[in-house]
Image (cartoon, grey):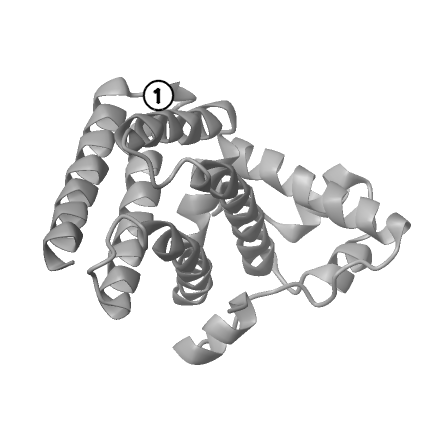
Amino acid sequence: MTVNTLAEDAGSELLVPRKRPTQERSQRKFDALLNTSRELLIEVGFESFTCEEVARRAEMPIGTLYQFFQNKYVIVCELDREDLVDVQTELDAFRGAIPSLDWPRFLDKFVDHLANLWTTDPSRRAVWLAVQSTPSTRATAAVHERELAEQVARMLAPLTPGTPRPRRKIMAEVLVHVVYSMLNFSIRDGQSHTEAVTELKRLIASYLIVAEKDGTEAV
């Protein structure tokens, strides 16, 4: 299921770019605007973030920015989508380790890896905070989370064979929201707060162990 389909199901208008580049030159401009936006977001925060300043720093006419993005809310939602794609890529690599008798060890490593992504890229937390700012951006971010949750639900299937698909879907959505929220709580000022990350691991592992047990007993 695509992000657009998820948005239609949710009854929300997805905040997306006016157009996506189809040529290399346009792609370079698009990427430069997003990269500049990340840097500016970290520096000034979302309230002081403006399209005019993004264009100025990217050394492009404001009209070029508006060709792609209607406003700053669309920009931060596109940054959120980029972060989603990165996490999906990491999940695809991790998926090969499940099911495994030693899956808690792989889970432990994966959470450490995600925490490292948040630590080395402070824009992730800045973007997450920005998309919480309005109902429209929150709705778009929720659609992104739902797409990621679909991927997680597929990963949970072999761990919870006796769990009905609708319940597994809810489990995945809860896990994704908790992990995102906890990572953005745990990683602050470019530092990983070890205790919080450790608690996140315990939380996820305990939840999945119970789910795995329930699934085994149901078979």
Give coordinates of residue 80: x percent, y percent: 52, 50
95 vs 22, left or right, is left
Residue type marked 1: Ser
Q: In the rendered image, is residue 11 in sight?
A: no
The residue lying furthest to the front in this view is: 219
Give coordinates of residue 138: x percent, y percent: 40, 60
Residue 73 versus residue 203: which sits nearer the camera? 203
Residue 116 versus residue 40: which sits nearer the camera? 116
Q: Secondary structure at mark 1?
A: strand
Give coordinates of residue 199: x percent, y percent: 19, 29
Count of numbered tags: 1
The structure residue drawn at horizontal position 40% and vertical position 61%, both measured from the top left corner, is: 146
Q: Is residue 167 above or below residue 110?
A: below
Q: In the rendered image, is residue 146 in sight?
A: yes
200 vs 49, left or right, is left
Image quarter hosting the C terminus: bottom left
Q: Is residue 167 above or below residue 39?
A: below
Q: Is residue 97 above or below residue 156?
A: above
**Dot 1, how many residues are within 10 Å of its Cα: few (below 14), some (14-19), or many (20+)?**
some
The structure residue drawn at horizontal position 80% and vertical position 59%, both measured from the top left corner, is: 63
Q: Quadrant location of residue 109?
A: top left
**Mark 1 = which residue?**
192
The structure residue drawn at horizontal position 27% and vertical position 46%, both measured from the top left corner, is: 178
The structure residue drawn at horizontal position 23% and vertical position 67%, both measured from the top left corner, is: 164
Give coordinates of residue 95: x percent, y percent: 44, 42
Q: Is residue 14 above or below residue 186?
A: below
